[in-house]
Image: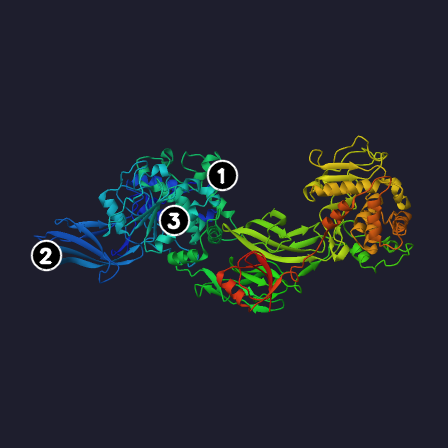
C-alpha cells in the first residue's frame, strides 16, 4: 500500500489557533500536537503499518514556524509597583500554596510565561512584589489546564515529555503525570559537557526529576554524574544516575531476547519507590528510549494506536525544525518507515531495529498468544530473559502507582512446607496481595502424583514416599510448596521389570523334583506380547509435572541414598515430563530425583525411591537377543549373585551361513559398550559359525578382550564330562574378573552353549535347581522363537542329560559341590584350582543390604538425634538438609540411619 497523507481542514492553515471558551482554561498542547493527537486514531489501522499521518502534521507545523516539541505556556501579566526590588510568581495546586512552584522574574517585568505545568489540573497563582523586605500581592486567582500530552520545555535538550496522560485500558483513566519522563541527552555524546542551560536544568529539577537513566553506550557517557545533580547537605549528588548501555542491543524487535529493558524498568521502579521521579533517555530519545517507552506504555494499558502516536511524536523534536523533511536528517520516526534513512519496511535487515512495526509484531509474538498488549508485556517482565525478571509484587506496585489499578501482586499460603505420612491430608489456604486485587482463578498441581495428590480446593494427600512440590497458581503467579513423605519399608514403591509373559512364567510353582520330563514352557507357546518382545524387560516410567519457565531438567538415579554414585545421570529438555528406565538391576532399591533451573537457581521437582521386585535382569538392546544378567539369583548362604559383571546373550557377529556373515550389529554393540560397560567377550561358537580370523572383541578392538571357545558345541548334554571347553571358558572368565573386566558371553542365540555356561557358573555359586532351570528355559522367550516351536526346556536332552552327568560325579554331594568338583578335577588335563574357584565364589556373591533393616535404627526421641538437629547435621535421603519429622531414612554425620518412632 502507498503511504497515506491526511489533508488537514482549512481551519488549520492559519496559525493553528486552538480556541478557548473560557479564558481561565489553558490548553498546554501546542496546536499542531493537539490536532495530531485528536483528529484521528491509529487504532483504526492496527494491521496497516503502511499508513502514517505524522509527516502531514509536521509539514503544516513547519509552516507555522514554532517549536513543535514544546508545550504552550500559561501567560501571566500584571502591573508592577514602583520601587520593587524583586518579583516572583507562585503557582500551586493547593489554595494555601503548599509545595508551590516559584518563578523569579525581574523587578521591572509585567508579564511571564510559565511552562511545563500538568494538564487537567486546577492551579492557584499569585504574583508577589518585594520591597524593603515586605511582600505585596499584585495579582492572584486560579486557572485550569487542559490537553493530555505533557511536553516539557527545557532549554538545551529536546523531545522531552511526561509518560503520563495517556488513557490506560486498565482503568479508563489517564496514566499518572510526574513520575516518569523521557527525552534526549542532557550531556553531549562522548563529552562531559552539559548541553542544558541553567534555565534548562532548573526546569528539569522543577518538574521533580531526581533520577536519570542513561541508555546510551558506555563510550557515549564519559561520567557517572547526572547533569541535573546538585550536592545535598552531606555533599552527595541529589539525583541518582545509572547507565545501562545494553539498551542499544535491546531496542525494537531485539527486546524479547535481551534483559536490558527488564533491568531498566526495575531501576525505574526502585527509584519511584524512593519517591524519585525518573528521566530516561538515549541520544535523541527515539529508538532506545522509544523501545522502553513502548514497553512501559503497553504494560500500563496504552492502546496500540496511542503507542504509535507516542512513538511518532519524536518526529516533532527541535533538531529537525530547520529541515523541511525530517527523514532527510534522520529524526523522523514513523510507524510505516524506519525513518533513520528513509528506507521502507523490510528493505534492510539492519534497519529493523528502528522500525515500529517490528517492535509491535515482536510484542505480538510474546505469550499469551491471544492476550492483550498489557498481558503480554506483563508476562514478558514477569517471566524475564536470561534469568532476569521483575517480581509480580514490583509489577503490581508499579501499575498501581502509575494507573491506580489494583493488580494482583502475589500470593501467600498458610504453609510453606508439608510433612505428611502416607494417607494423611492437609489443606493449603491461599491469600492474595494486595488485598482486593482482581484475579480469575486459583489452581493447584502436584509435580508428582506418585508422591502427593492435590484437589481443586488445595487438599494435599500423601500417597507415596518421597518429596514433591505442590504448585499453587493464581493467574500465572506461582508458589512451590514442598511435600515431604518419609520413605519406609511399607511405603516403598515396588515395580517388576518382567514383561507380562515372563512374570506369569516366573510365578509358576518351583521345580523341586527330579522329573525332568516336565516343563511349564509349553503352556506359553501361543502367547504373545501386545508390544515389545518376550526377551525384553518391562520398562519403568517415571512421571512428573515440569515447572513453568524451568530449564535444564536433569534426572539422577542412584543405588546410594545420598546420590554419591549415579547410575543414570541424564539431561532432559524443559518440556519432558516422563522418562522410561530400562536395564536396572532387579531386586535393588533405587533413589531418584528430578531437578531443574528456575530463575537461575537449581530446584528439585520431585524425588523418591523404588524397589525392583523381579529377580532376573532382562536387558533391552536393539539388534541383539536373549540378553540377561547372570546376577540376581540367590546363592550360597542366602547371598545374591552379583549384578553387572557377567552377561549372556546372542552373538555379536552374524554366522558365516548368513548374508554378510561376520559383520557386527553396530547399534547393539554400542549399547553393550556404553550402557553395560562390556569390555570382554567370550564367544562359544565353533569354527563353522565364526570366521577363524576373528580374534578381537566386537565392542572395542583396542581396549576390550576377546576369547573364542570353539569346542563348546561338542560338550553339550552328557558330553560335558568328555570335553574341556567350558573349563577353559570358566578359567578365562575368572582371569578377566580379576582384571575388573565386564564380560559378555554368547553362542549363536545365547541358548544352549551359553545356557550351559550360565548353568555351570550359577550352579557353582549355589543357585537352586529351580533357578538354574528357569534361567535355561528363559531363552525360549527370545524373539518369536517360542511361537515358532523353537524352545529350550529342562526336559531337553541337552539340559536333563547335563544335570544327570554332573550329579553322577558324586551321588552323595549337592549339585553345587559336584560342579565345584567338575571344575577342580577337570577334563583332559584342564582344571581350575581351588584358590581360583573360592575367589570366584567370594567375588560373585554379595549380601544384599536393606536400607530399612540393615541400618542402625535410632529412636526419634533420643538425645543424640536432638543434638544433631540442633547442629544442623541432619539430611534426608536425598542428601538435602532436613528436620526429622517422622520415621524414615536420614543421614547423620555421613552415616545412614533409620529413624523409628
Report the disc number at residue 73: none
Q: State the residue position of label 1.
A: 1
| Mark pair 3, 1: CA separation | 22 Å
State which quarter of the image contains the C terminus: bottom right
Of residues 282 and 700, the one drawn nearer to the viewer in this rendering: 700
Q: Which residue is mark 3?
A: 39
> Is there CB contact under 8 Å for labels 2 and 3?
no
In this rendering, which labeled residue sits more in front, label 2 or label 1?
2
Are the residues flagged by discs 3 and 1 in contact, CB closer than 8 Å? no
Which residue is nearer to you in this view: 696 or 109?
696
Report whether 12 appears left or right of 544. Answer: left
Q: Earlier in the sequence, mark 2 or mark 1?
A: 1
Residue 150 rendering spot, x and y as whole percentages: 32, 50
Residue in the image at 59% along x and 51% along y: 564
- Mark 2 → mark 1, Cα distance in angstroms: 69 Å
**Residue 475 x, y percent position in the rendering:** 51, 59
Crowd tier of the residue under label 3, counting other residues whose Cα lies within 10 Å: few below 14, some 14–19, many 20 or above: few
Asked whether residue 575 appears in the rendered view, the answer is no
Quarter residue 588 falls in:
bottom right
The residue nearer to you, when weighing 769 against 619, is 769
In this rendering, the label closer to the viewer, 2 or 3: 2
- Precedes in sequence: disc 3 or disc 1: 1
- In the picture of the structure, the residue carrying the numbered disc 2 is 133
Q: CA distance from mark 2 to mark 3?
A: 52 Å
Q: Going 39% across and 57% down the picture, which residue do you hit?
A: 403
As drawn, 687 above or below 521: above
Is residue 42 at least partly visible in the picture?
Answer: yes
Circle 2 SS class: loop
Q: Is residue 340 above or below residue 15?
A: above
Amino acid at each position: 500500500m502507498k503511504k497515506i497523507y491526511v489533508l488537514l481542514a482549512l481551519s488549520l492553515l492559519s496559525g493553528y489557533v486552538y480556541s478557548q471558551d473560557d479564558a481561565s482554561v489553558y490548553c498546554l498542547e501546542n496546536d499542531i500536537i493537539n490536532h495530531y493527537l485528536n483528529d484521528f486514531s491509529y487504532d483504526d489501522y492496527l494491521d496497516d503499518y503502511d499508513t502514517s499521518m505524522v509527516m502531514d502534521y509536521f509539514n503544516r507545523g513547519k509552516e507555522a514556524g514554532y517549536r513543535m516539541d514544546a508545550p504552550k505556556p500559561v501567560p501571566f501579566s500584571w502591573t508592577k509597583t514602583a520601587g520593587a526590588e524583586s518579583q516572583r510568581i507562585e503557582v500551586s495546586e493547593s489554595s494555601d500554596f503548599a509545595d508551590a512552584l516559584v518563578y523569579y522574574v525581574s523587578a521591572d517585568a509585567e508579564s511571564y510565561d510559565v511552562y511545563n505545568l500538568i494538564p487537567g489540573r486546577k492551579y492557584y497563582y499569585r504574583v508577589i512584589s518585594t520591597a524593603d523586605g515586605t511582600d505585596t500581592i499584585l495579582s492572584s486567582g486560579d486557572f485550569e489546564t487542559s490537553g493530555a500530552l505533557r511536553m516539557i520545555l527545557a532549554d538545551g535538550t529536546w523531545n522531552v515529555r511526561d509518560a503520563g496522560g495517556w488513557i490506560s485500558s486498565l482503568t479508563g483513566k489517564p496514566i499518572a503525570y510526574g513520575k516518569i519522563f523521557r527525552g534526549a541527552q542532557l550531556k553531549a555524546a562522548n563529552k562531559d559537557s552539559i548541553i542544558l542551560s541553567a534555565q534548562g536544568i532548573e526546569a528539569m529539577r522543577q518538574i521533580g526529576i531526581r533520577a536519570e537513566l542513561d541508555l546510551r553506550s558506555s563510550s557515549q557517557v564519559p561520567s557517572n554524574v547526572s547533569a541535573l545533580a546538585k550536592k545535598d547537605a552531606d555533599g552527595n549528588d541529589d539525583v541518582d544516575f545509572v547507565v545501562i548501555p545494553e539498551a542499544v542491543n535491546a531496542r525494537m524487535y531485539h527486546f524479547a531476547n535481551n534483559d536490558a529493558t527488564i533491568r531498566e524498568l526495575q531501576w525505574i521502579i526502585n527509584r519511584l519507590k524512593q519517591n524519585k521521579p525518573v528521566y530516561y533517555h538515549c541520544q535523541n530519545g527515539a529508538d532506545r528510549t522509544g523501545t522502553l517507552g513502548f514497553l512501559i506504555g503497553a504494560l500500563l494499558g496504552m492502546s496500540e494506536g496511542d503507542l504509535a502516536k507516542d512513538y511518532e511524536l519524536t518526529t516533532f523534536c527541535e533538531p529537525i525544525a530547520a529541515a523541511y523533511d525530517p527523514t532527510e536528517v534522520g529524526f523522523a520516526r514513523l510507524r510505516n518507515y524506519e525513518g533513520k534513512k528513509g528506507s521502507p519496511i523490510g528493505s534492510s535487515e539492519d534497519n529493523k531495529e528502528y522500525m515500529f512495526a517490528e517492535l509491535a509484531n515482536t510484542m505480538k509474538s510474546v505469550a499469551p498468544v491471544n492476550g492483550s498488549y498489557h498481558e503480554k508485556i506483563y508476562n514478558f517482565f514477569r517471566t524475564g530473559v536470561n534469568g532476569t525478571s521483575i517480581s509480580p509484587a514490583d509489577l503490581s506496585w508499579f501499575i498501581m502507582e502509575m494507573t491506580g489499578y489494583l493488580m494482583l501482586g502475589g500470593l501467600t499460603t498458610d504453609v510453606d512446607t508439608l510433612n505428611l505420612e502416607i494417607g494423611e491430608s492437609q489443606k493449603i489456604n491461599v491469600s492474595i496481595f494486595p488485598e482486593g486485587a482482581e484475579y480469575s482463578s486459583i489452581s493447584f498441581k502436584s509435580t508428582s502424583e506418585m508422591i502427593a495428590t492435590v484437589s481443586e480446593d488445595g487438599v494435599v494427600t500423601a500417597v507415596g514416599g518421597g518429596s514433591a512440590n505442590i504448585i499453587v497458581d493464581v493467574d500465572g503467579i506461582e508458589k512451590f510448596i514442598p511435600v515431604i513423605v518419609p520413605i519406609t519399608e511399607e511405603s516403598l514403591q515396588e515395580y517388576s521389570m518382567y514383561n507380562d509373559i515372563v512374570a506369569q512364567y516366573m510365578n509358576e510353582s518351583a521345580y523341586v523334583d527330579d522329573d525332568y520330563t516336565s516343563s511349564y514352557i509349553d503352556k506359553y507357546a501361543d502367547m504373545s506380547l501386545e508390544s515389545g518382545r518376550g526377551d525384553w524387560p518391562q520398562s519403568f516410567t517415571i512421571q512428573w509435572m515440569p515447572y513453568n519457565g524451568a530449564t535444564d531438567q536433569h534426572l539422577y538415579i542412584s543405588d546410594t541414598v545420598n546420590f554419591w554414585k549415579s547410575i543414570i545421570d541424564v539431561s532432559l529438555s524443559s518440556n519432558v515430563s516422563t522418562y522410561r528406565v530400562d536395564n536396572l538391576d532387579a531386586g535393588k532399591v533405587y533413589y531418584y530425583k528430578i531437578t531443574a533451573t528456575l530463575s537461575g537457581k537449581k530446584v528439585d521437582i520431585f524425588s523418591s525411591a523404588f524397589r525392583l521386585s523381579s529377580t532376573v535382569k532382562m536387558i533391552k538392546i536393539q539388534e541383539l537377543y536373549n540378553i540377561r544378567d547372570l546376577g540376581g539369583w540367590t546363592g550360597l548362604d542366602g547371598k545374591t549373585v552379583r549384578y553387572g559383571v557377567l552377561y549372556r546373550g546372542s552373538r555379536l557377529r552374524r554366522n558365516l551361513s548368513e548374508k554378510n556373515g561376520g559383520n557386527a550389529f553396530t547399534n547393539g554393540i554400542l549399547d553393550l559398550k556404553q550402557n553395560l560397560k562390556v569390555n570382554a567377550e567370550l564367544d562359544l561358537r565353533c569354527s563353522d559359525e565364526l570366521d577363524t580370523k576373528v580374534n578381537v572383541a566386537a565392542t572395542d578392538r583396542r581396549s576390550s578382550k576377546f576369547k573364542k571357545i570353539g569346542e563348546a558345541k561338542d560338550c553339550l548334554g552328557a558330553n560335558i564330562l568328555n570335553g574341556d571347553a567350558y573349563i577353559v571358558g570358566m578359567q578365562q572368565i575368572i582371569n578377566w574378573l580379576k582384571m575388573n573386566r565386564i564380560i559378555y558371553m554368547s553362542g549363536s542365540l545365547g541358548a544352549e552353549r551359553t545356557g550351559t555356561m550360565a548353568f555351570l557358573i550359577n550352579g557353582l555359586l549355589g543357585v537352586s535347581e529351580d533357578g538354574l532351570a528357569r534361567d535355561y528355559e528363559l531363552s525360549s522367550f527370545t524373539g518369536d522363537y517360542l511361537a515358532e516351536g523353537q524352545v529350550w526346556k529342562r526336559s531337553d536332552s541337552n539340559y536333563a542329560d547335563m544335570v544327570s552327568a554332573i550329579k553322577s560325579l558324586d551321588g552323595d554331594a549337592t549339585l553345587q559341590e559336584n560342579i565345584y568338583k567338575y571344575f577342580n578335577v577337570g577334563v583332559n588335563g584342564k582344571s581350575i584350582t581351588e584358590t581360583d574357584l573360592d575367589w570366584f565364589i567370594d567375588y560373585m556373591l554379595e549380601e544384599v543390604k536393606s536400607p530399612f533393616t540393615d541400618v542402625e535404627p535410632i529412636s526419634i526421641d533420643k538425645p543424640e538425634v536432638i543434638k544433631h538437629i540442633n547442629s544442623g547435621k541432619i539430611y534426608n535421603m536425598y542428601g538435602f538438609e532436613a528436620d526429622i519429622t517422622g520415621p524414615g531414612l536420614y543421614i547423620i554425620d555421613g552415616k545412614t540411619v533409620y529413624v523409628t518412632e
